[in-house]
Amino acid sequence: MDWIERIKTLLPEFDQIRQEREIHIREEAQQTDRDRNTIDSVISELQIPEMLQGINAVVLHGQGTISIESSWETQNEDTEYTLEDEGTGPDYISVILSWNEPTGGDQEREIAVDVGITMNGIYLQINEIDIRPDRSAVETALLEAIKEELRLII
């Protein structure tokens, strides 16, 4: 059997490998979509942006800004185009309250709430401290975070 004939006999196997690859890619994309929807749901159910807005309104008198960033979308500062990220780590969304604290010179402060998903499941961090993803734990952690951010100025 010459080389070309040998390759031709393997064509059905190659087709099967391609089909399996396409199924795998499709399943991974569907799982990624489900994971990202789960992250969105946690942020929405816990009302993270609304809680940070409450801190901004009451403690900071509206001087802060709230931004929401996701690991799968990045903003190109030069072009302001949103780019899809193929992902090199776990998916997450960060909700960030940032402000300048006047103390002889403005000092930028922030409270960052990260909600993500890894192989171990959902995680929630406030300023890089792991928190249970439930409302009372988040409320307590946010109050501690604002105290800590204000203390850092002393």
Image (spheres, rainbow, N blue to C red):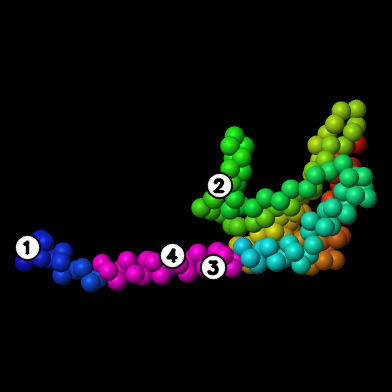
Label 4: element kind: helix
Q: Which amino acid, mark 3?
A: Gln
The residue at the point 67 percent across, 55 percent down is 93
* Residue 15 part of the magenta-drawn span: yes
User: Percent position (x, y) of residue 97?
Assistant: 79, 47
Label 2: element kind: strand
Quarter where residue 42 is shown = bottom right
Of 17 and 65, nearer the camera is: 65
To which residue does mark 4 refer? 25
The residue at the point 84 percent across, 53 percent down is 53
Q: Which of the two marks, 1 or 4, is nearer to us in this view?
A: 4
Quarter where residue 41 is shown = bottom right
Label 1: element kind: loop
Left or right: 99, with 25 as reference point = right
Q: Which amino acid, mark 2?
A: Leu
Looking at marks 3 and 2 on the same chain, the residue that comes earlier in the sequence is marked by: 3
The residue at the point 54 percent across, 68 percent down is 31
To which residue does mark 1 refer? 2
Q: Magenta span covers which residues?
A: 14-35
- Up-down relation of residue 71 to residue 78 (above or below): below
Total labels: the figure holds 4
Is residue 147 in view from this perspective? no
Q: Which amino acid, mark 1?
A: Asp
To which residue does mark 3 refer? 31
Q: Which of the two marks, 2 or 4, is nearer to us in this view?
A: 2
- Contact flag, marks 2 and 4 (Cβ < 8 Å): no
- Assess disc 2: are there few (<14), some (14-19) or many (≥20) residues with their C-alpha within 10 Å of its C-alpha: few
The residues tagged by marks 2 and 4 sit, at their Cα atoms, a distance apart of: 20 Å
